[in-house]
Amino acid sequence: MKHIDDQTIETRIYSENRQPNVQQKKLISDFLEGKADNPLPGCSLFILRIRNNMFHGLKDIYTLNEQQEMFIGINSFLKFILK
């Protein structure tokens, strides 16, 4: 899997006013790169940010449909965790 750098995490996953700490960045990048021994913490942080980004702030309506499959997967995962 491709390397995810801090810049990508800071600009694509987190907003300017809500930046992750070093440990959160590592958990997310290890999860996204498939390097995590326990992927649940990184996966959970990633999902939290994606869902928060979905429900807050401006959206590009032209590309929102491109993210539909990702949101369906995230919501399925959250439903599984809640059961």
Image (spheres, grey):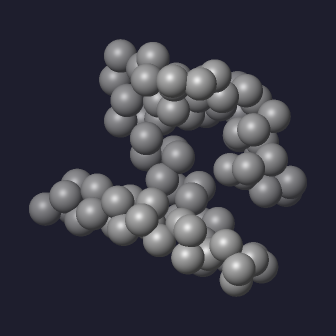
Which residue is located at x 56 percent, y 68 percent?
Answer: 66
Which residue is located at x 35 percent, y 35 percent?
Answer: 40
User: Measured along the vertical axis of the image, is residue 47 above or below residue 30?
Assistant: below
| Residue 66 visible at all | yes
> Is residue 11 toward the left or the right of residue 41 in the image?
right
Specify the quadrant that holds the C terminus: bottom left
Image quadrant where residue 35 sits: top left
> Is residue 2 toward the left or the right of residue 56 in the image?
left
Which residue is located at x 55 percent, y 76 percent?
Answer: 65
User: Residue 27 placed where, x, y %?
Assistant: 53, 28
Image quadrant where residue 75 sits: bottom left
User: Measured along the vertical axis of the image, is residue 62 above or below residue 25?
Assistant: below
User: Residue 7 placed where, x, y %?
Assistant: 81, 34
Q: Residue furthest right?
A: 16
Viewer-nearest residue: 24 or 46: 46
Viewer-nearest residue: 59 or 37: 59
Which residue is located at x 73 percent, y 26 percent?
Answer: 5
